Every structure is written in C-alpha cells, then in structure tokens.
Image: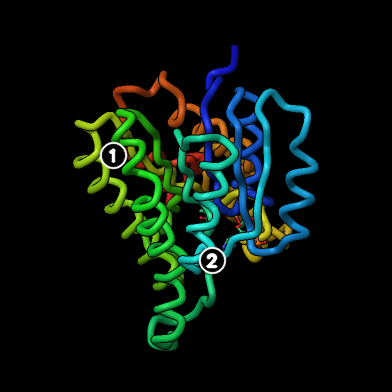
Amino acid sequence: MGRLEAKAAIVTGGTRGIGSAIARSFAREGADVMLCGRKPDGVQKAVAELQGLAGRVTGIPCHVGKPEDLNTLVETAMREFGKVDILVNNAATNVAQGPCLTFDEGQFDKMVEVNLKSTFRLVKLVAPAMIERGGGSIINIASIAGIRPQFESLLYSMTKAALIMMTKSYAVEFGPRGVRVNAIAPGLIQTVLSEFFWKDPEKSAKLMSLQPIQHLGQPAEVAEIAVMLAAEESSYLTGQTITVDGGRLLAW
Ligand SMILES: NC(=O)c1ccc[n+]([C@@H]2O[C@H](COP(=O)([O-])OP(=O)(O)OC[C@H]3O[C@@H](n4cnc5c(N)ncnc54)[C@H](OP(=O)(O)O)[C@@H]3O)[C@@H](O)[C@H]2O)c1
C-alpha cells in the first residue's frame, strides 16, 4: 500500500522540474494528482508521461498569477477528486537578476503576484475544506535563497523568505485544526529554472565543490521530501522549512 493511498493532491508548476518529480512520486505512492503549468502542451506532455502509476494524474493549464485560473484549478480538482488533501505551491518565477537598484516596481509586483499571492490565494481556496475535514498537508516550495540572499536576486530571495514566514503563520493557525503546513528550501537542483548555474560544467563543478554532498541535486531528491511531508508519517511536523541542498548552506 502506498504512503499516499486515497489522497488527492494539487501540484502547481507540475509540468517539469521539481513539480513534475513531486507529481510522479505522489502518484507512485497512490495519490491522485492534479498538476498545472501555463502551457497547454506542457500539461498534456507531463500528464501523458505520468500515466500508469498507482494514482491518477491529470492536469489543466493555469497561470498561478491569475486568480480566475486558480479558481478553475481548484474547481477542477474538486470535480475530479471530490477533495484536496495535499496542496503543493511549487510554481514560481524569477523575472530578473541584477543589482538591487536595477529592479523596477513592475518586476517587484510580478514576483509578488506569481511567487507569493498565488500561495495566498490557493490556501484561501483549499484550506477551508481541509479545516472542515480536520486534515491536510500544505507544502510550499521555497529556496535556500529565502534563508541566505542569493547573489543579485533581491526579488527572488525576498519572495522565498516571505513564503517561509507564510508557512509558519499558517502552521500556527491551522495546526489545531489538523492541517500541517511546511516548506522545502531546495539548493541547486538541475532544472530549467536554474540552468544559469549548472549548464556550464566548469561553473557547476565549482559550485559543487562548495557543498558537502558534491553532486548536482535532482528533482527526485526534493520530491521524496515532499512525499514525507504529505504523508501521515510526518504527523508531528509543522511550520518547518526542510533544506534540501546537499549541505550547501553549511558551507557558503
Ligand atoms: N531548480 C532549483 O535550483 C531551485 C532551487 C530552489 C528553489 N526552487 C524552486 O522550486 C520550484 C520549482 O522550480 P523548478 O526549478 O522545478 O522550475 P522549472 O523547471 O522552471 O519548472 C517550473 C514549473 O512551473 C511552471 N510555471 C512557471 N511559471 C508558472 C506560472 N506563472 N503559473 C503556473 N505554472 C508556472 C512551469 O510550466 P510553464 O512554463 O508551462 O508555466 C513548470 O511546470 C520553484 O518554486 C523554484 O523557485 C528551485
């Protein structure tokens, strides 16, 4: 029997990278999964790749920065599964890197809209029913950039730090009602989002040499932690941010 048997999950940004690995691991453990991404062909491809697992994987296009898309995402999950036990707020963006003084307000607003307000809105849509049923697990994908500032990444780091505090705030309030809220702070993981850091083998090797565990992190290594946080085995764990970074923060 899978560790997430009879559970239903939403995973935002589940069409590739960390989100797709989480969707795969959840379905392997028996959960039904509704994933999303902005691009319809990306959703179609990801859903096709994730068939034949213990749980059912389906998906719809959804831009997490658009409230109407989030409504549709949750309505569709409720229609398909009748409930949402697990919410993974994974989709995020990084519109610009550079010195702090070069960012403009449009970029600031976009980062808040996509990386933070999406979680705020989705929690409002999903948590009331979890609270009513007396159970649920919300997992926010933060970053080590939210713990230590990533070089020339004011906006990204700021949103991830805020996500960690949102995690704690929700955890305090929802804990007595049976809903656990935790975050994962990945270090460098080999995905499209982080190509800048690992595509050049020399740069990647240099970064790896700074870490106690010296391989480039893989999405599946984050996904297994998400399974643990979603499963009943972590029933005494809430408000935490689990750093999955090969020990990188110890060595910066
Ligand atoms: N990779 C790393 O090294 C690393 C490190 C620390 C934290 N993280 C965090 O891990 C999470 C996943 O990142 P990743 O590296 O797996 O990124 P990725 O490979 O770029 O995948 C991002 C996923 O999110 C979707 N997405 C992007 N913007 C979206 C939006 N506005 N609405 C809905 N879906 C959207 C993408 O699909 P579409 O393009 O079709 O929308 C895709 O499915 C993010 O929260 C990121 O900040 C990553």
Where in the figure is residue 15, as x and y percent of width and height? 68, 51
Left or right of 153: which side holds 171? left
Tag 1: amino acid: Gly
**The CB of the residue at mark 1 lies under 8 Å from ligand 1:** no
**The CB of the residue at mark 2 lies under 8 Å from ligand 1:** yes
**Of residues 34 and 98, which is closer to you in this image?**
34
Q: Residue at x 32, y 34 (%)?
A: 180
For residue 41, the mark is none
Note whether 210 is above or below 5 in the view shown: below
Evaluate whether residue 37 shows in this view.
Answer: yes
**Of residues 100 and 107, which is closer to you in this image?**
107
Q: Residue at x 61, y 47 (%)?
A: 35
Q: Residue at x 30, y 28 (%)?
A: 134
Name the residue beneath numbered marker 1. Answer: 239
SS under mark 2: loop
Where in the figure is residue 119, as x and y percent of width and height? 40, 56
Tag 2: amino acid: Thr
Name the residue beneath numbered marker 2. Answer: 93
> Which quarter of the rendered image does ligand 1 occupy?
bottom right
Note whether 251 is above or below 105 in the view shown: above
Residue 223 position by quadrant: top right
Q: CA distance from mark 1 to mark 2?
A: 23 Å
Reading the chain from its start, which is encountered first: label 1 or label 2? 2
Where in the figure is residue 153, as x and y percent of width and height? 45, 71
Q: Residue at x 50, y 32 (%)?
A: 225
Where in the figure is residue 120, as x and y percent of width and height? 35, 58
SS under mark 1: loop
